[in-house]
Amino acid sequence: MEWTLENQIDSTDIRIINALMEDGRIAYSALADEIGSSNTLVHQRVKKLKDQGVLKKPVFLVSPEHAGYDTTAIVLIIVKEASQISEVITALKGISEVVNCMSIMGRYDLMVRIYAINNRHLQDIVHDKLQAIPGVEGTNTMVAFEVSFERQIRIPDADTISAYRSYKK
């Protein structure tokens, strides 16, 4: 029996996705050769994956260091009232140096990653932009020495999915 996700991603789709994550500009003919399939099948599958929203859009990843950003920081944010979280997130989207935002549980409500030119720039972002957002009660900033690696998440294999979905405590 072939494993499929709820949105009908099969092992061929997974091979296509993995290849595209390595090189989003790969020609469909080369991709077809790599996975041992036809150009037509690759075209059909990529279209299906786009239509389902699995594949969003091909992008180039900019190296923050080469773009002039020498400081990477994680900032934990406390929001005064839970009802203000969506407004705070909306305000964070307007700060270009904030590259991602996650809602988290525990003492803090949000966690953001910031790229800054240097520590002074980071200080200005935190003090003048983040802490000025209505609803932000406090922040805790952690500066990274370096980003050792970064990658996209891989689609897990069928055995892993099956093992964890059937796991009961």
Image (cartoon, rainbow, N blue to C red):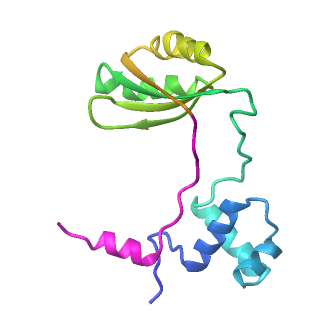
Q: Quadrant of the N terminus?
A: bottom left
Q: Position of residue 97 (x, y in %)?
A: 61, 26
Which picture quadrant has residue 22?
A: bottom right
Which picture quadrant has residue 118?
A: top right
Q: Residue at x 20, y 69 (%)?
A: 168
Q: Residue at x 34, y 30 (%)?
A: 109
Instruction: Inspect the magenta stretch and tell me whether residue 164 lies in it.
Output: yes
Magenta stretch, residue numbers: 146-169
> In the picture shown, does residue 82 fall above or below 129?
below
Q: Residue at x 68, y 27 (%)?
A: 69
Q: Position of residue 163 (x, y in %)?
A: 33, 74
In-front residue for pair 25/86? 25
Q: Residue furthest left?
A: 169
Q: How many marks?
A: 0
Q: Is residue 3 left or right of residue 163?
A: right
Q: Is residue 47 left or right of residue 98?
A: right
Q: Position of residue 94 (x, y in %)?
A: 58, 24
Q: Is residue 47 left or right of residue 154?
A: right
In-front residue for pair 22/58? 22
Q: Residue at x 39, y 19 (%)?
A: 139
In-front residue for pair 48/117? 117
Q: Position of residue 93 (x, y in %)?
A: 55, 28
> In the picture shown, does residue 81 fall above or below 74?
above
> In the picture shown, does residue 85 fall above or below 120?
below
Q: Residue furthest front?
A: 145
